[in-house]
Image (cartoon, rainbow, N blue to C red):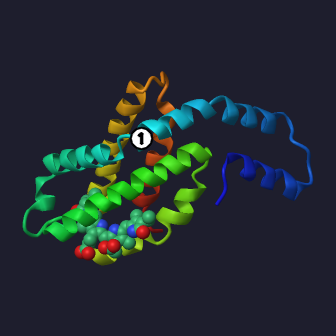
């Protein structure tokens, strides 16, 4: 698992090079945004259960068929599995935000996920919708905690939905 700094070091070490201007710019940006990223993580940690609950409620309001007989989140067990998945997405998004790297998502969340979902009939489109709902709720929370520019919060959520939605070739 890598963060923004170890990734950069890896790249330059393979080439046997000192950091150039580009690398320095990236390091600067990583450290300059550090406080906001940590503050976002704190805002999420303090509200994680509520964020997951609200995201689930909004998803099931928008797509009530998910929790009706025949829906993938129908029955208490599957409803709970769905919210647990949302909680995974939130927790790992927080790690990726702090790391400034999406590597943890590839390694711990996305690997084999689409195959698992397909084999269990977990619908991908609604999962993507749920992650996007959660992104917007998280951004509200992060903004409310005093972070002025919350655009960086998009990245891990958009990364997960992009990877999940990718079509097989
Ligand atoms: C940390 C990385 C990680 C992830 C991401 C993960 C996902 C994951 N979600 C699963 C199931 C599931 N996932 C869902 C999710 C949903 N159903 C819907 O209709 C909604 C659209 C959606 C919620 C938003 C459901 C309902 C199941 C249970 C499916 C079943 O057993 O029939 C399963 C199958 C095994 C199990 O039930 O625990 C895995 C592995 N597991 C992991 O370890």
Residue 159 appearing in the image: no
Q: Indicate the position of residue 19 as horizontal and vertical percent values.
A: 86, 41
**Which residue is at a point 40% across and 55% down the rendered structure image?**
89
Label 1 neighbour load within 10 Å: few <14, some 14-19, many 20+: many
Residue at 32% x, 78% y is: 119
Question: Is residue 8 toward the left or the right of residue 107 in the image?
Answer: right
Asked which quadrant contains residue 76, the reply is bottom left
> Which residue sits at x=59%, y=31%?
35
Observer-nearest residue: 168 or 163?
163
Q: Position of residue 111 (x, y in %)?
A: 50, 68
Q: Position of residue 114 (x, y in %)?
A: 40, 68
**Quadrant holding ligand 1?**
bottom left
- Using the image, determine if residue 129 lies above or below residue 65: above
Any part of residue 86 in sight: yes
- Name the foreground residue: 114 vs 45: 45
Residue occupied by mark 1: 44
Residue at figure coordinates x 79%, y 39% from the top left: 23
Asked whether mark 1 lies closer than 8 Å to ligand 1, one says: no
From the viewer's perspective, tell me whether residue 47 is left or right of residue 27. Answer: left
Q: Please, is residue 13 above or below residue 169 in the view?
A: above
* 106 or 41, nearer to the observer: 41
- Considering the image in quadrants, where does the N terminus appear? bottom right
Identify the residue at the far left of this view.
69
The answer to which image quadrant residue 143 occupies is top left
Please, what secondary structure does the residue beneath circle 1 have? helix
Which residue sits furthest front? 46
Furthest residue in direction bottom, as rendered: 119
């Amino acid at each position: 698992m890598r963060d923004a700094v170890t990734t950069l070091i890896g790249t330059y070490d393979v080439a046997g090079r000192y950091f150039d201007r580009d690398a320095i710019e990236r390091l600067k940006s990583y450290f300059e945004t550090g406080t906001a990223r940590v503050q976002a993580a704190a805002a999420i940690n303090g509200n994680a259960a509520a964020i997951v609950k609200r995201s689930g409620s909004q998803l099931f309001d928008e797509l009530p068929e998910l929790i009706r007989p025949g829906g993938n989140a129908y029955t208490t067990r599957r409803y709970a599995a769905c919210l647990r998945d949302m909680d995974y997405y939130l927790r790992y998004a927080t790690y990726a935000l702090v790391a400034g790297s999406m590597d943890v998502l590839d390694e711990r969340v996305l690997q084999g996920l689409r195959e698992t979902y397909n084999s269990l009939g977990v619908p991908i489109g609604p999962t993507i919708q749920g992650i996007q709902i959660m992104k917007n709720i998280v951004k509200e929370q992060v903004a409310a905690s005093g972070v002025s520019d919350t655009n960086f919060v998009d990245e891990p959520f958009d990364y997960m939905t992009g990877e999940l939605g990718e079509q097989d070739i």
